Image: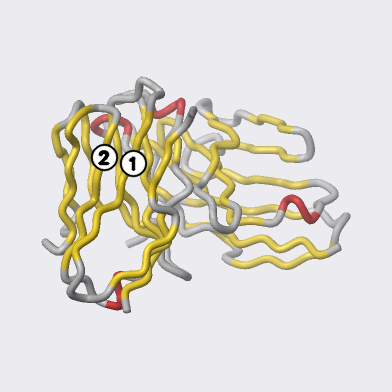
C-alpha cells in the first residue's frame, strides 16, 4: 500500500508550458517535503511545508500544502529543460518515531526545448 | 567536503563476490538511512540507524548487512547478491526527530550484479 500517491507518474511537456504535480494521501502529515532528483544523483530537498493551506514559492515553483495536511501540489510556471528530473514528495507522519519520511513513487518530468 | 558522500559511484559485481558500499557525512546528523531505488519503483527504505543503533530493518534479505561504526559513517556489506539486486543504492542522513530539515542524500552507488 502506497501511503503517498503522486500523479502523474510521467509528464513530457514543451519548454514554456505550465504543469502541476499532485501528491495525495488518506493520512495526515505533520509536514511534507518536495525533492528533485536528477539522473545519476540523489534527491535534493526543494521545500518543506508545515501548515495546512501553506503556499511557498521558489522562483517558478509554487508548492501548496492542503488544508487538511493530507495532500500537496507542485506547480511549475514556464517550465525549462533544466526542470527535467524526478520529483518526489515525502511526508512526516504525526507521532512518527524519529521523523522518518514516507516517500511517494515520484513524478518523472521531461521538458523538451 | 560537505554533504553526504557515497563510494563507489559505480560497482559491478558477480553473484559470488563480496563488496561494501560506504557512506560518510559530516553534517552533524545523527540518523542515517539506506534506500534502494530501482527503475519504475518507489524509493525502498532498507535500514535506519539512529544514534548509531539500527532502529529499522525493512525485511531486507540477509545478503545485505549494514554497519554503522559511528554517527558519521555507514556501510552496506554485500555478499552473494542476485541480478534483481541491481539498483541505485542511496544513503541519506538527517537530524533525529527533526523532519522539517529533511534528508540529505548522497549521489548513490549504481550497482550492477552480473
Between A108 and A72, the one lying in front of the other is A108
Q: Disc 1 vs disc 2: Cβ atoms closer than 8 Å?
A: yes
Query: Circle 1 sits in a helix, a strand or a loop, which is it?
Result: strand
Residue under numbered circle 2: B74
Q: Is residue A90 left or right of residue B49?
A: right
Q: Residues within 10 Å of mark 2 (few under 14, many from 20)?
A: many
Residue B82 percent coordinates (x, y): 24, 76
Between A54 and B95, the one lying in front of the other is B95
Q: Does B85 appear above or below B114?
A: above
Residue B39 percent coordinates (x, y): 46, 70
Residue occupying image coordinates x 15% and y 53%: B65
Residue A94 percent coordinates (x, y): 33, 32
Q: Does A108 appear above or below A57?
A: below
Q: Callout 1: residue from which chain?
A: B
Q: Is residue A3 left or right of residue B49?
A: right
Q: Is residue B29 left or right of residue A38?
A: left
Amino acid at each position: 500500500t502506497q501511503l503517498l500517491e503522486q500523479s502523474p507518474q510521467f509528464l513530457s511537456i514543451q519548454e514554456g508550458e505550465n504543469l502541476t504535480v499532485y501528491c495525495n494521501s488518506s493520512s495526515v502529515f505533520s509536514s511534507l517535503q518536495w525533492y528533485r532528483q536528477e539522473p545519476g544523483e540523489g534527491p535534493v530537498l526543494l521545500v518543506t511545508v508545515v501548515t495546512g493551506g501553506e503556499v511557498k514559492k521558489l522562483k517558478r515553483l509554487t508548492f501548496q500544502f492542503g488544508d487538511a495536511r493530507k495532500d500537496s501540489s507542485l506547480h511549475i510556471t514556464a517550465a525549462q529543460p533544466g526542470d527535467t528530473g524526478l520529483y518526489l514528495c515525502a511526508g512526516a507522519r504525526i507521532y512518527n518515531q524519529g521523523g522518518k519520511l514516507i516517500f511517494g513513487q515520484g513524478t518523472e518530468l521531461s521538458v523538451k526545448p | 567536503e560537505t554533504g553526504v558522500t557515497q563510494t563507489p559511484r559505480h560497482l559491478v559485481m558477480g553473484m559470488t563476490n563480496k563488496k561494501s558500499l560506504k557512506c560518510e557525512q559530516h553534517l552533524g546528523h545523527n540518523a542515517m538511512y539506506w534506500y534502494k531505488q530501482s527503475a519504475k519503483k518507489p524509493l525502498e527504505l532498507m535500514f535506519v540507524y539512529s544514534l548509531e543503533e539500527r532502529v529499522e530493518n525493512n525485511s531486507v534479505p540477509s545478503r545485505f548487512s549494514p554497519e554503522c561504526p559511528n554517527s558519521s559513517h555507514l556501510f552496506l556489506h554485500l555478499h552473494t547478491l542476485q541480478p534483481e539486486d541491481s539498483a541505485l543504492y542511496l544513503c541519506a542522513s538527517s537530524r533525529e526527530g527533526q523532519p522539517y530539515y529533511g534528508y540529505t542524500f548522497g549521489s548513490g552507488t549504481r550497482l550492477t550484479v552480473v
